[in-house]
Amino acid sequence: MQLLHYLVCMGTLLRVGKFRVAMHVNDHNPAHVHVSGPDFELLVFLDDLTVEGTAAEARAAADALAWIEAHRLELLERWAREHA
């Protein structure tokens, strides 16, 4: 499974502490990024910054979520280019 995950990942967009923000190739709509932590993965939907995961996971990944919010428009543009 790890090899498959590596093959479909566009690469890490950001590392913040123990967290990684990534956008996957051929991923489903709506536009989103993955925030991977030591024991979980969150989805952050870029249209409205909705987080799919637990409140505790979102609090733990606060720095990564702040970066996503600050770069939301750039991330949406990248999604549009890569998923056109």
Image: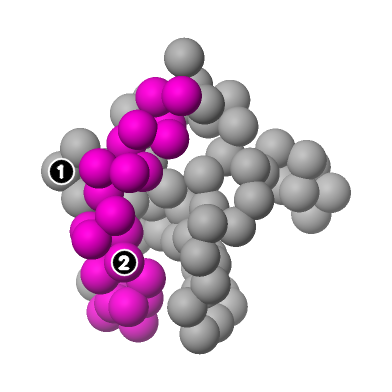
Residue 77 is covered by the magenta coloring: yes
Residue 44, given in percent of the width and then of the height, sits at 32, 51
Q: Residue at x 22, y 59 (%)?
A: 69
Which is nearer the eye, 2 or 15?
Answer: 15
Which residue is most to the left?
Answer: 48
Residue 54 lies in quadrant: bottom left
Which is nearer the eye, 34 or 71?
Answer: 71
24 sits left or right of 34 in the view: right
Query: Which kind of residue does numbered mark 1 sit on?
Result: Asp
| Segment tinted magenta in the rendering | 56-81
Q: Looking at the rendered structure, which numbered label has been put on residue 67? A: 2
Secondary structure at badge 2 equals helix
62 sits left or right of 78 in the view: left
Which is nearer the eye, 56 or 73?
Answer: 73
Which residue in the protein does label 1 denote? 48
> Above or below — where is 43 with respect to 7?
below
Residue 5, given in percent of the width and then of the height, sits at 72, 47
